[in-house]
Structures are given as structure tokens and as C-alpha cells.
Amino acid sequence: MNQLLSGSHTAKTLWRGALTLGLAAAVAAVVGGAPAARAGHNDSGVFASSQTVPLLQFPEGLVAWHNKLYTATYNVVSPQDSRIFIFNASSGRLERTLGGRPGEELISAGALLGLTVNPANGDLFAAGNFTGQIIRIQHADTGNPRVSVYAQYPSGGGPEDLTFGPDGALYASDSNLGVVYRISAQGQLQLLIGPAGSGAPISDNGLFGAPVVGLSPNGLVFSADGRSLFVANTFADRVVAFDVNAQGHVVSNGRIFAQHRNPDLETYPTGFDALVEPDTHFGPSATTALNGPDGLQLDLDGNLWASCVLGDNLTELNPHTGAVIRTLGTSANTQGGLLNAPTNTAFVGNKIFTSNLGIFSSLPWTIVQFELDRH
């Protein structure tokens, strides 16, 4: 839901300024507050907190690789303090922090969003939302990471989320401009999916539409069989699907895969007033399936999970029918739960981790974990 705060357009700049004033006070309250409760690493609970990792502010991107958990921060209050943290997924130990050091300036040049790993070689990729850059970090978990610009978005664009496709290419969303790109191994952008008039070869069939800039397209992921691309429209409480051919190329047939509309919100969205609709209510009525899908991810069984940033839950969907299998978690804001604007998930064994953006709250920022039971 986050490109509202980025880009060069006047409206977004004003919006970011208004929101930042409110968030600065929240940052001071959180950093100076009481420590968050921490669960044992075999239980559901808090995995990491800004109370013990002070720059873990507005954690957004999240990805797991070889028992390491990587998270990127969308620090809209102090963009130069945006970081990528690398945790041991088993012990919870913070092993490395990227950004804020010589050679890592690209990471701390502005707020970050989605993360992904190239399964072919382990390279880490980050969405540099404020700079419009896709950043590649090679050897991320060593003492000598190599950080470079992999691709540059056009003016006004901002990287949102990232995923690798069955053809080996990187796919990236841009909810400033409302499009999806395919990025070649040489870092060349190919406009792939977009609305009428965008010049994209594949139409979104109007399904990326949102009255608020920065909410769609958001998270994206390919199905386990590689024959569908799923894309989140956060405002419309919708997941859109596109067909992928046998060669691994996205072809067409944009359609609603799953949608469960709910205008309700857990708390008032300070700085995002346009999210409030005439029939919006505030409170636990917002905690429904697919309310504000942000990041999308597959579990080990190939089921599709959506991090519901507006409804403070994780929604599991059948990857073939779009039917809701279950929701997991409750709101830290209204129900005493663990979730506070969750944006992305990652899976390690029987655990699911999620990053809590916490953008409308003065609670500590956290990454939380749940033990999953297998169906």
C-alpha cells in the first residue's frame, strides 16, 4: 500500500509530508516505550522488534533463503535509515545489517519495499521505492556484499514488489504508474501489464484500478506450476490472475481470482484519508479475509497467502479456485493479537513469518511468527 508516499508527483509529496509529521511522533513513542513481549522460537509470537533492533522501523519486504530471514524497512520518517536486516530464522539472532556503510549507500538512499532472491544464484533484490531503483545485493550475508543498481524505473515510477518467474526473469510491480514489468537478466525493463493507454502489451482489463495512487498493483507471485501470475490490488481487496504459457511467459486473460470486499479499517489511516469510504467502520470488523491484500507468497504446499495490510490477518487461498482456506492471526490494534498492518510473509519449515509495517499505529514494529499446522 506504500507508493502513496513516494514518487515525484506533488500530491504524493504533500501526502508524504503530512503523514511523516504524524509518524515522527509515533517513532519517538515506540522507541522510548516498553519492550515488546518476545516468544520462544518454537512458538507463535514476536520474532524481532524495534525495541531490540531500533532501526527495524516500518519493516515491509520479507524473504527467506537457506534459513536466513531478510527484511527491508520502508522508513518514511528517516529514509536514510532504511536498512535490510538478516536474521537467523531458527535462533532469531540478527546476523547482519545492510545499509548505512561505505559501499551500501544504495540501500540507505531511500525507503525500501519488496525483497526477493534469485533462486538460480542466491542474489538478493530490493525494491528501492523512493529512488525508483531495483537494487541487487550479491553475497548479502557475507562481510563484503556487492551492491549495484539492477534496473531503473521511469520518472514517476516506484518499485513495489518483486518475484522471479518460471522463465528466469525478474517481475516487478509499480503502483505509482499502475503497471507490471518484466526485467531481463541484463536489467532491461519491459512494460508487460497495464491499463488501457499505458502501452503495455497485456491489458489489466481494468482490474488494477484504484482511486488512490499507490495501492495497485502490489504484491505478485507465480503459482507453483508456473502457469499463473497472481497480482494484488490492495484497495479493491482483490487478487488478479494472468495466464502463463508453457514457455514461462505471461500471456493474457487478466481476471479476478479472488475478491472479498470490506471497506472497514482497523484504525484511522492517518495521511491516507482517501482509504475511508462512506460506509467504512473502524475496529475488529475489518479483520476479514482478503481485506487489503499486500504481499503474496506461496507456502510449501503451493497454497497462496495474502498479507492483509488493512484487515490485520493472513489469508490462505486455494491456488486453483481462489477459495479462502483460512485466515490466520488477529489485530494487535483492536484484538490484542500479533498483526499490525502485515505486508509480506516468508516460510521456513512449518513456520510462517510476517513483517508488520505498523504505519497507522504507535505500537512497536515487529516481525512475528506462527507455527503452521498442515492440512
Image (tube, rainbow, N blue to C red):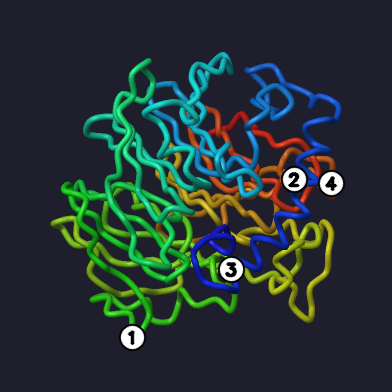
Amino acid carrying mark 3 in the image: Lys
Residue occupied by mark 4: 335
Alpha-carbon neighbours of circle 1 within 10 Å: few (<14), some, or many (≥20)? few
Residue occupied by mark 1: 197
Position of 212 compared to 207: left or right? right
Name the front one of labels 2 and 3.
3
Alpha-carbon neighbours of circle 2 within 10 Å: few (<14), some, or many (≥20)? many
- Whichever of labels 2 and 3 marks the residue nearer the N terminus, that label is 3
Q: Residue 168: give x, y in percent of width and height.
A: 20, 46
Distance (Cα) linking label 4 and label 3: 32 Å
Residue occupied by mark 3: 12
- Whichever of labels 1 and 4 marks the residue nearer the N terminus, that label is 1
The reply to whether discs 1 and 2 touch (Cβ–Cβ < 8 Å) is: no
The reply to whether discs 2 and 4 touch (Cβ–Cβ < 8 Å) is: yes
Q: Residue furthest front?
A: 102
Residue occupied by mark 2: 330
Amino acid carrying mark 4 in the image: Gln
- Whichever of labels 2 and 4 marks the residue nearer the N terminus, that label is 2
Query: 58 or 347, which lies in front?
Result: 58
Determine whether the residue tagged by mark 2 lies in a helix, strand or loop: loop
- Whichever of labels 3 and 1 marks the residue nearer the N terminus, that label is 3
Q: Residue 364: give x, y in percent of width and height.
A: 76, 35
Name the front one of labels 4 and 3.
3
Determine whether the residue tagged by mark 1 lies in a helix, strand or loop: loop
Position of 126 compared to 210: left or right? left
Distance (Cα) linking label 3 and label 1: 22 Å
Name the front one of labels 1 and 4.
1
Distance (Cα) linking label 1 and label 2: 40 Å
Determine whether the residue tagged by mark 4 lies in a helix, strand or loop: loop
- Whichever of labels 4 and 3 marks the residue nearer the N terminus, that label is 3
